[in-house]
Image: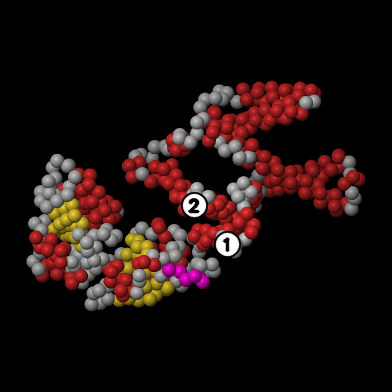
Amino acid sequence: MKENIMHSLKIVGLGPGDAGLITMASIVVMKRATCLLLRTAVHPTVSYLKEKGIVFEALDRFYEDGRSFEEVYDTMTDYVMERLKEDDVVFAVPGSPAVAEHTVTELVEKCKAAGVPYEVLPGMSFLESLYTKAGLDPVNGMLVLDSFDLSRISVLPAVTVVITQVYNDRVASDVKLALTEQYGDEYEALVVHHISLPDERIEKIRLFELDRLHYVDHLTSLVLPPRKEEDKADKLPFDIGPLVDVVARLRGEGGCSWDKSQTHKSLRRYLIEEVYEALDAIDANDTDGICEEFGDILYQVVIHAKIAEEEGLFSAQDVVDHVTSKMIKRHPHVFSKKSLEKSDSSVINWDRLKQDEGRQQHKHLLDGVAKGMPSLLQSFKLQDKAGRKGFEWPTVDGVWKKLEEELQEFKEAVVEGQFDHMEEEAGDVLFVAVNLLRYYNIEPECALHRANTKFRRRFAHVEDRVKDSGRQWSDFSLDELDAFWNEAKADETSSNQDHGGR
């Protein structure tokens, strides 16, 4: 392609809608063009081009054939590149070529790849008029989004948000649904319609009214003002920013002495406790509890990040950036355009991707298993990783024999009576027992958790029976207490049968 294309491309903007706002440089370029292509003829300034006798070709037909905007822009820009083989091309887009123009971005990339000379001329977008009409100053922060790509508003920004191309009732409804979850139905916004045109309209609405306007078109935008300080805590959803600010305040001058004194090591046990409390809430199906405990875990993440930031190591933003990048890299079948073209039979090897990421970090395979995790889980992961390399018995029979062998060695150590040897052999028994569970795809932590829960429940029944009797624990024989235990066991069996359990 680089050898065949010898011509150049100029990209100009048609302004926000009033012909008087098209730059003189753009008008001169369009008048001199031997090949002028318009992304769309659906724009008020096109009538001006016709009045001036400027000949052009509109590319609206690509919108009729494309199944998605991505496909439309791809085929449209391919067509522009083909025309460049024959002549110099001027490509004109609504507004400014530098603002919210996907075709311009694609064309620039394709020109760079093909070695085609190109120039993007400065132009006036609707934003300049919006700044004046709506009294906005971009210095205070602004986020400009396309109506069909609101992914970056998944957390509520503390700046003005401008959403472009709310071009019909259906899109208005989709935008409303996406925004009300973050801002609420009653949040006030500005609808900006045909700005700088004779029928200009700027209307203040509440979000729930957005799809009731019926006058929206391709020159309609929505402006969401930044949330007010008093709205942050009570009326609107949090993003992570306020929590980061709270932690900074707690550890800053005039903050909390306890928070200020914490280190990574001193907080370690609290992080572990919060995780286990979250697991308890999950097991209890306690929705409110799960939400609360996840918040406590998030606080732990943020305060650890703040400590690291104070030491010049990393920040909360680095944490978010790292995990986001990692998830994208580990899911190429979702985020890679190339892999989307492959068949559904393509299977992504998660462990291989993790290994590739950690190749520079770990000298040995098992170095990737955290030494600080619970020993039962650590044992499972160590043996699982080794097993994936072929270091395991071919059948489970070998594990059963090994367990019997370790039990016998533990018995011999008990007879010997040396504690260190007993502890070592006991560890070997547990280690092999974990491996046995692995062969049956049983998570040892989950299995032991169920056993612990069952023991708590049954012992609570025994305790209640003792209390109800009015006697002391010492008054009961082990056989009597065991009978209470069996009562609890029988009640569980009966309950399981009533609910179809086994």
Q: How is the image coloured?
A: secondary structure
Say which quarter of the image contains residue 51: bottom left
Q: Position of residue 321 (x, y in %)?
A: 44, 50
> Which residue is painted at 37% across and 65% down in the image?
142
Disc 2 to disc 1, C-alpha distance = 19 Å
Q: Residue at x 62, y 52 (%)?
A: 262
Nearer the observer, 192 or 393: 192
Q: Cβ–Cβ below 8 Å for labels 2 and 1?
A: no
Relative height, residue 367 to residue 462 (above, below): above
Relative height, residue 34 to residue 183 (above, below): above
Q: Residue 491 or 171: which is nearer the viewer?
A: 171
Question: Looking at the rendered structure, which numbered label has been put on residue 315?
Answer: 2
Q: Residue at x 17, y 47 (%)?
A: 116
Whether residue 37 appears in magenta in the rendering, the answer is no
Numbered mark located on residue 317 in the image: none
Secondary structure state at the residue bearing disc 2: loop
Q: Which residues are magenta?
A: 226-231
Amino acid carrying label 1: it is Glu
Tell me the residue that label 1 is attached to.
Answer: 253
The percent position of residue 484, horizontal first and vertical second, equals 82, 45
Answer with left or right where residue 357 lies relative to residue 466: left
Quarter of the image with the C terminus in it: top right
> Is 110 situated left or right of 392 in this image?
left
The picture places residue 345, in percent across and down from the top left corner, at: 39, 37
